[in-house]
Image: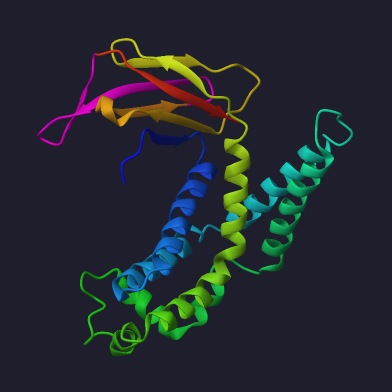
Amino acid sequence: MMTSVILYEYPFNERIRTYLRLEQLFRRLGELASREHPLDHHFALVSIFEIMDVSARADLRSDVLKDLEKQKQLLDGYRGNPSISEKVLDGVIAQITHCFDTLNQQTGRAGQALTENDFLMGIRSRIGIPGGTCGFDLPAYYAWQHRSGAQRRHDIGEWASTLAPLAESIYLLLKMLRDTGMPQKVMTQNGQFQQTLPQGRSFQLLRLRLDPATGFVPEISGNRLMVSVRLMRPEEDGRLHAATEDAGFELTLCA
C-alpha cells in the first residue's frame, strides 16, 4: 500500500526495542487471524510462537508492570492542574489500571499456558524446520487446516487470548511514549544530519517521517548524547550507497 510518508522508528534502549518487536508481531497476528485462508492461519500461529519467543525473557512482564505503574504515578501528579481535563485524565488512568490489573493477574511468562497444549507444541517443534509442517509430519495439524475458516479463527482467538493482556499493555505504553514527542522539520547537509540531545532528558524513541518519493533510506544511530541520520540510496545491485544530496524530513524525539 502506497503512503504519503514512511515512518521509521529507532529505539534507544533494549526495553523499547522489545516493545516494538512485540507490537509488530501482535499487529501481524491480528491481521492474519482475521482472514480466511489456511495459509494465513499458519502464519498466525508462527506469529504466536514468535511472540512467545520474544516474551521468554524473565523480566519482561516485570518491566511492563513497572512502566505502567510509573505512568500512573506521573499522571496522578497532574490532578488539580486547571489546564488538564480531569475527565480525560481519569480515563487514561483507568486504562493504565486495567492493563496493570489484567497483566498482574497472569502468572508466568506470556503464553505459558499454551506450552501445556500438546497440539500447539507439536507444531512449534516442527515449524522452524524447512517444510517441517507437511501433512505426513503433522497429520493432526493438516486436518486442522481443512476445518472451516470460522472454526480456525475461533481456535486462534482462544489461543491468542492468553497473550491479550501483554498486547494491550504494550500498545498503551507505546502510544503514551509516542505522544510525548514534538515533531520538528529538519534538513540534512550532504546527506547527513546530527543533533546533540539536551542534558537531563532521557529519550527512548526516535521517529522519522520521510517522503518515499525522495528514494532515500535513513540509516539511524543514537545514544543519550546525540542522534545521527545518514541518508542512503538503494542502487540497482541492491546495496545501499551514501547519498550526498540535501533532503528534509520530520524528526520526533520521545521521552
Is residue 95 found inside the magenta-colored segment of the image? no
Question: Which quadrant of the rendered structure holds the C terminus?
Answer: top right
Name the residue at 22% across, 80% down. Answer: 134
Which percent across, then down, holds residue 208?
Answer: 43, 29
Q: From the viewer's perspective, is 40 left or right of 186?
A: left
Q: Residue 59: tell me if it is visible.
A: no
Q: Is residue 247 above or below residue 8?
A: above
Query: Camera-side residue: 153 or 72?
Result: 153
Q: In which quarter of the image is residue 109?
A: bottom right
Q: Is residue 208 left or right of residue 101?
A: left
Residue at screen point 31% across, 73% down? 37
Q: Is residue 29 visible?
A: yes
Residue 228 in the magenta stretch? The answer is yes
Image check: 215 left or right of 3? left
Given residues 160 and 221, the one toward you in this image is 160
Residue at 40% over, 22% down:
249
Q: Give the range drawn in magenta.
A: 223-244
Q: Where is residue 19 in the image (x, y as percent from the top left)?
A: 52, 48
The location of residue 111, given as percent across then percent down, is: 53, 69
Indicate whether 230 appears above or below 64. above
User: Residue 228's image quarter?
Assistant: top left
Marker count (numbered) = 0
Apparent side of residue 147 relative to residue 85 in the rendered image (left or right) = left
Q: Is residue 240 above or below residue 157?
A: above
